[in-house]
Amino acid sequence: MTPPDLNSEDFIRACATDTLRWPAGPWTSPPDAEAFYRKRCADLCRRFDLKSQCEWNHYGSGYASYIDAWFYRDTPEFRVAPSLGQKYEYIGLWVLFHRLSPYYVMGQGWKSWDDANAVASRYMPRMDEVDHIESDAVLSLSSDIQRQLSYHDLIRLNREEVAQPIPHDIAIETVLSDAKFHLFDALFHWMD
């Protein structure tokens, strides 16, 4: 199937209002799409010996147009020197899976938590962090994950693509960015 034109105003408006109807695969049904992504995340963890923390439930409130999956390894190259007073602090790779289409973006992010496993602090996905990866370990992981996701016909969007401005009259309810919206905001938005 040929993906839609990312510059199409109809496509952008459908994404911004969460009314996009992808004509194939698991995206024709939100529960099927979520099951598909759950399987992909479990497969990635098994294949690449990863740990993950995934936000399936819209960060516990509101609505997120994406699933925020974060992958890391419990190894020295992913550990961060304790700076926030938490027992566990790691860098890892975040992947935002669009809930209504096969698009995703990636970036590097960190999380910290204690023995109660409650995340004390974390990254929040932003457009300017798409493709921003500083760690060699996370960069290597991103290549492995992209290759595996491509095998399942998922489409990675890069920073240049998602940084395209969208028509100024399109309003998006999101706390992830300000009012000058881009394709990133149409695809990946969250309102608490």
Image (cartoon, grey):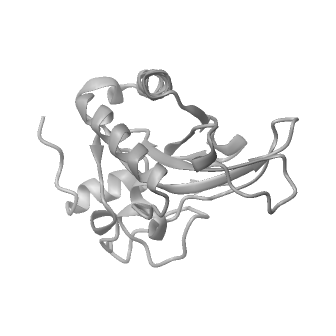
Between 78 and 11, the one lying in front of the other is 78
Left or right, residue 69 beside residue 76: left
Using the image, determine if residue 188 lies above or below residue 128. Answer: above
Can you name the residue that lies furthest to the front here? 76
Which residue occupies 45% across, 55% down? 136
Q: Is residue 189 visible?
A: no
Using the image, determine if residue 31 lies above or below residue 97. Answer: above
Which residue occupies 41% across, 27% down? 33
Can you name the residue that lies furthest to the left here? 2
Left or right, residue 85 beside residue 36: right
Between 101 and 46, the one lying in front of the other is 46
Using the image, determine if residue 82 lies above or below residue 36. Answer: below
Give how far across and how far down residue 18 sits, in percent.
43, 47
Residue 182, quarter of picture: bottom left
Give how far across and how far down residue 108 sits, in percent.
51, 56
Which residue occupies 64% across, 37% down? 74
Q: Can you say which quadrant of the picture contains the C terminus?
A: bottom right
Give how far across and how far down residue 166 sits, in percent.
32, 71
Left or right, residue 63 beside residue 169: right
Q: Is residue 142 visible?
A: yes
Between 178 and 120, the one lying in front of the other is 120
